[in-house]
């Protein structure tokens, strides 16, 4: 493990400019985002806490006692690991629950949000700079430093080189790390923005030393608002936590945070008051007219979509497919009225039109309808009577209901449509990989991170060995100039480190997909967060990889 720490004498001139905090973030944050003061409060806990402080909140989690709380441990980043970890981790960034954009946490700004924080070199390598908030402290009082970030990068490099599948590959390309006070510089052998996704949680270098960086965190100092106790599901207030509220009082507000396993049923747990908030997939078991319970539908990064098949195996399913005709694909996109469709089938997913590569915000797909008249006009341009077979998994209720409604909608514009319900194993292990479908409904996951966006680009790249199963652009009429340009973007984007240029290319690629329509993004799935608001306030549900406890330092018990 090669590390080199810059000496103060040699680096002082450089640090005077390189350590200057960058400009403001371009990430949108919610009004409930945790304050990030730059000066540590001197307020200490007292026997009688001030108004608004104190109390215990119980969070339902899908986990058993003994859950590994290491963000880079063998269990990977499960939802339970994240929910619990937010209480004790020093996170580099949070993810905004509305936009899915990164919000700086323990650092002053992310490298992509700081002028000159990413430097490229003539040999193709790049150096990125992180600066820790000078107020940030571990629970033992030691400042969180650039050395901690450099140490974390070296640990992750070793894990990738040892074959750890849980760590993003970009960390294996670290060739050098440097640190001075609150600043860290990490040099990678090649350019890529995915480093920013990979480096999410800072490890305490002074506490781990030569110990196991992938073991449980029980003996480490906390970098979050709470402290580990002897009970792996109970956490106490961290009196050295560095964030303060608007009045300058040291956070968190709560005295205690308890995680309660709800493997036997989250609905029963919240109804019986065993927990104060819980996330579930189906809220039907909760009495929604209970004035003490608030149910929030929260969009997730899970994108339900329709994908058209273009390979030869499609003809075995529908020999009369019109998928090769752009007007037909656009007609299908135009006739879909998302809010009406979801209301008709009673599926409470997010009706806002999503994107494929850019999941949130203004969608390139808003160009399509909804208009039954315009869709019928496009169908009228065809020389044949279109036939459609929509395949999906029949193991749950939502997709069959949606496909059944889509069949009726397509029949309304003179498309002879039928549904093909398959067992999930058949669909995902046979039908999709072999391209044996006409139109298929399933889901991709894209949380808007650089890694997920690049993965989606690769999936739809006709020149890629790993395809989206549709065979779009590989051969036949869809192998056109637009598909060729998409491949050019997919090849170029992974090397880009200029953020504006990156998103410009991704936006162009999204526009190509929206114009060529090999896929129709339908909805983001939702989860439901049930909160007993008479027992906890300040919760901002977050279905991104930050989890619902992302702002736990701001939670309060009413009446305290």
Image: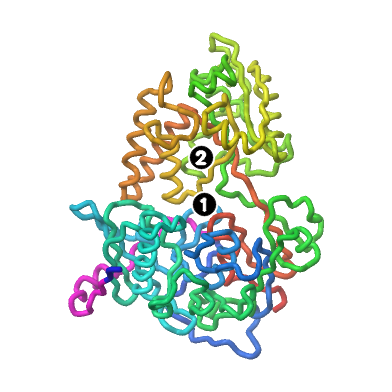
Quarter holding residue 208? bottom left
Tell me which numbered mark, 1 or 2, is placed earlier along the sequence: 1
Q: Residue furthest bottom?
A: 47
Quarter holding residue 428? top right
Residue 475 shows in the view:
yes
Rendered location of residue 472, percent (x, y): 45, 27
Residue 355: numbered disc: 2
The residue drawn where x is 44% and y is 65% is 92
As helix, strand or loop, the secondary structure at mark 2 comes to loop
Residue 32 shows in the view:
no
- Say if the magenta span includes residue 15: yes
Rendered location of residue 358, percent (x, y): 47, 43
Rendered location of residue 86, percent (x, y): 55, 68
Residue 91: numbered disc: none
Q: Nearer the viewer, residue 326 or 320?
A: 320
The N terminus lies in which quarter of the figure?
Answer: bottom left
- Say if the magenta span includes residue 158: no
> Magenta segment, which residues?
4-30
Local packing at callout 2 (Cα closer than 10 Å; few below 14, some 14-19, many 20+) is: many
Q: Residue furthest top?
A: 383
Q: Is residue 151 above or below residue 229?
A: above
Report the residue marked by disc 1. 99
Q: CA distance from mark 1 to mark 2?
A: 12 Å
Q: Is residue 141 above or below residue 546?
A: below
As helix, strand or loop, the secondary structure at mark 1 comes to loop
């Amino acid at each position: 493990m090669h590390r080199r720490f810059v000496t103060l004498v040699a680096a002082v001139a450089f640090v005077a400019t390189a350590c200057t905090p960058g400009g403001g973030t371009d990430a949108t944050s919610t009004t409930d985002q945790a304050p990030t003061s730059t000066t540590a409060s001197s307020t200490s806990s007292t026997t009688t806490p001030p108004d608004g402080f104190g109390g215990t909140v119980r969070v339902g989690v899908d986990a058993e006692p003994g859950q590994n709380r290491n963000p880079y441990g063998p269990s990977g980043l499960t939802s339970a690991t994240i929910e619990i970890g937010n209480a004790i981790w020093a996170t580099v960034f949070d993810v905004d629950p509305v936009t899915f954009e990164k919000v700086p946490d323990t650092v002053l700004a992310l490298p992509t949000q700081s002028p000159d924080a990413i430097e490229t070199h003539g040999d193709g390598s790049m150096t990125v700079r992180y600066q820790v908030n000078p107020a940030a402290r571990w629970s033992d009082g030691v400042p969180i430093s650039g050395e901690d970030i450099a140490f974390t990068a070296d640990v992750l490099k070793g894990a990738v080189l040892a074959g750890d599948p849980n760590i993003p590959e970009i960390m294996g390309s670290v060739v050098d790390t440097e640190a001075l006070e609150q600043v860290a510089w990490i040099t990678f052998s090649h350019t890529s923005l995915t480093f920013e996704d990979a480096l999410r949680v800072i490890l305490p270098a002074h506490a781990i030393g030569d110990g196991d960086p992938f073991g449980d965190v029980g003996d480490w100092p906390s970098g979050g608002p709470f402290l580990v106790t002897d009970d792996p599901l109970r956490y106490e207030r961290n009196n050295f936590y560095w964030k303060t509220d608007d009045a300058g009082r040291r956070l968190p507000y709560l005295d205690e945070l308890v995680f309660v396993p709800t493997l036997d049923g989250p609905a029963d747990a919240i109804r019986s008051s065993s927990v104060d908030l819980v996330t579930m997939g189906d809220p039907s078991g909760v009495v929604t007219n209970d004035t003490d319970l608030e149910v929030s539908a929260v969009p997730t990064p899970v994108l339900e979509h329709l994908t058209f098949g273009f390979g030869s195996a499609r003809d075995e399913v529908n020999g009369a497919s019109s998928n090769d005709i752009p007007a037909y694909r656009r007609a299908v996109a135009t006739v879909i009225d998302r809010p009406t469709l979801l209301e008709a089938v009673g599926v409470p997913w997010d009706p806002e039109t999503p994107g494929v590569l850019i999941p949130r915000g203004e969608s390139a797909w808003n160009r399509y309808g909804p208009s039954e008249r315009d869709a019928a006009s496009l169908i009228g341009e065809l020389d044949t009577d279109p036939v459609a077979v929509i395949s999906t998994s029949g193991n749950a209720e939502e997709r069959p209901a949606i496909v059944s409604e889509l069949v009726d909608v397509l029949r309304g514009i003179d498309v002879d449509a039928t549904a093909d319900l398959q067992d999930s194993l058949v669909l995902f292990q046979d039908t999709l990989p072999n391209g044996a479908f006409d139109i298929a409904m399933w889901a991709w996951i894209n949380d808007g991170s650089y890694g997920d966006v690049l993965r989606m680009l690769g999936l739809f790249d006709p020149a890629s060995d790993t395809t989206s199963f549709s065979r779009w652009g590989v051969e036949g009429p869809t192998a056109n100039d637009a598909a060729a340009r998409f491949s050019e973007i997919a090849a170029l984007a992974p090397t880009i480190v200029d953020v504006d240029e990156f998103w410009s290319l991704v936006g162009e690629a999204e526009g190509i997909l929206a114009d060529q329509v090999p896929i129709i993004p339908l909805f983001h799935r939702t989860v439901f967060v049930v909160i007993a608001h008479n027992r906890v306030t300040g919760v901002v549900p977050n279905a991104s990889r930050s989890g619902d406890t992302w702002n736990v330092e701001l939670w309060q018990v009413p009446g305290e």
